[in-house]
């Protein structure tokens, strides 16, 4: 009896936690189809007359541009993170060299650094910021490049730096579990370390690579603090910064804001459900080896 009560309590607790995560998403989606007055007077009621005009207004407020900018920044950042993390994870998992434990600990210590603690030094020494500050003294081509892509370069560096520790940790844990016989057979065939990584380890570690990519893409897609500090050009604004422009100084149409939030959330949900199997496989692979 006590075991049954304990199991019921655990299930109830898990259900409450799941509800706490799902409720805000459902509420924002419901609000996207309501008028301003309905959101205030009946916040939890189902929309009786869906307001598609909210989505039209949000799209006319440059949501398409913000989606494209977020897509470009996210794809570039995740690609750079994976390209840099895979060789590092392979080296820490399979090679023995002096100071490897210290160097790995130094990289993983990045997991403990909050974004807010590095905003000031990043603002003064970020390559993108320096590029923008020196653009006036540079050539016409440098000024043109800085004007159009300087804000993106300013956020790409911090995104890559903050994404490397977790990605190295995930890939290294998976690489350690790959049987030595696979790499030994590749060495006998004359493969070097980079060839072994590219042709043996990365194909085998696809679940871990997919898991790391989705985690990083989700974080970068929703990141606000760094984007708000470094992105000022309207043409380069990402979703999180662009949504802030929907908020007026004296009044805000929350129906339009929620419609923009809805359009920002849908790509992440599609990505998650499309690769859900790989995420679970990547997270549980190390536990069953």
Image: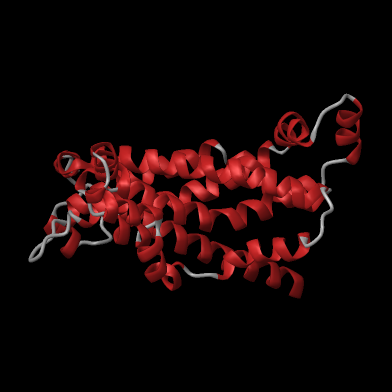
**Is residue 217 visible in this depiction of the protein?**
yes
Residue at 52% over, 50% down: 216
Q: Residue 189, how many percent across, how many down?
A: 88, 24
Q: Residue 248, how many percent across, how many down?
A: 12, 60
* 30 versus 141 height, above or below: below
Residue at 78% over, 36% down: 193
* 105 versus 280 height, above or below: below
- Front residue of 136/220: it is 136
Residue at 75% over, 75% down: 2
* 207 versus 232 height, above or below: above
**Is residue 29 visible in this depiction of the protein?**
no
* 224 versus 242 height, above or below: below
Left or right of 175 in this view: 236: left
Quadrant containing the N terminus is bottom right
Image quadrant in which you'd find residue 12: bottom right
Most extreme residue toward the top is 189
* Total tally of numbered discs in the picture: 0
Q: Residue 260, how many percent across, how many down?
A: 25, 47
- Front residue of 208/143: it is 143
Q: How is the image coloured?
A: secondary structure
Most extreme residue toward the bottom is 2
Left or right of 163 in this view: 22: left
Residue at 45% over, 57% down: 158
Q: Residue 23, how many percent across, how many down?
A: 40, 59
């Amino acid at each position: 009896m006590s075991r049954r009560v304990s199991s019921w309590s655990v299930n109830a607790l898990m259900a409450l936690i799941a509800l706490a995560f799902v409720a805000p998403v459902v509420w924002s989606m419901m609000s996207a189809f309501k008028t301003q007055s309905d959101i205030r007077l009946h916040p939890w009621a189902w929309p009786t007359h869906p307001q598609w005009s909210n989505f039209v207004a949000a799209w006319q407020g440059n949501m398409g541009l913000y989606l494209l900018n977020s897509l470009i920044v996210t794809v570039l950042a995740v690609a750079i993170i994976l390209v840099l993390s895979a060789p590092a994870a392979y080296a820490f998992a399979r090679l023995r060299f002096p100071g490897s434990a210290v160097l790995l600990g130094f990289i993983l210590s990045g997991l403990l650094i909050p974004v807010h603690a590095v905003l000031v030094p990043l603002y003064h020494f970020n390559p993108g910021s320096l590029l923008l500050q020196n653009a006036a003294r540079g050539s016409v081509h440098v000024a043109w490049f800085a004007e159009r892509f300087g804000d993106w370069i300013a956020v790409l560096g911090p995104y890559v730096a903050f994404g490397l520790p977790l990605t190295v940790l995930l890939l290294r844990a998976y690489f350690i579990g790959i049987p030595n016989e696979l790499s030994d057979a590749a060495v006998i065939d004359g493969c070097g370390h980079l060839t072994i990584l590219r042709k043996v380890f990365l194909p085998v570690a696809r679940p871990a690579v997919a898991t790391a990519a989705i985690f990083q893409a989700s974080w970068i897609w929703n990141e606000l603090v760094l984007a708000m500090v470094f992105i000022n050009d309207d043409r380069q604004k990402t979703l999180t910064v662009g949504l802030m422009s929907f908020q007026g100084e004296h009044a805000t149409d929350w129906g339009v804001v929620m419609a923009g939030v809805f359009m920002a959330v849908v790509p992440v949900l599609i990505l998650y459900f499309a690769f859900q199997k790989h995420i679970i496989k990547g997270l549980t692979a190390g536990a069953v080896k």
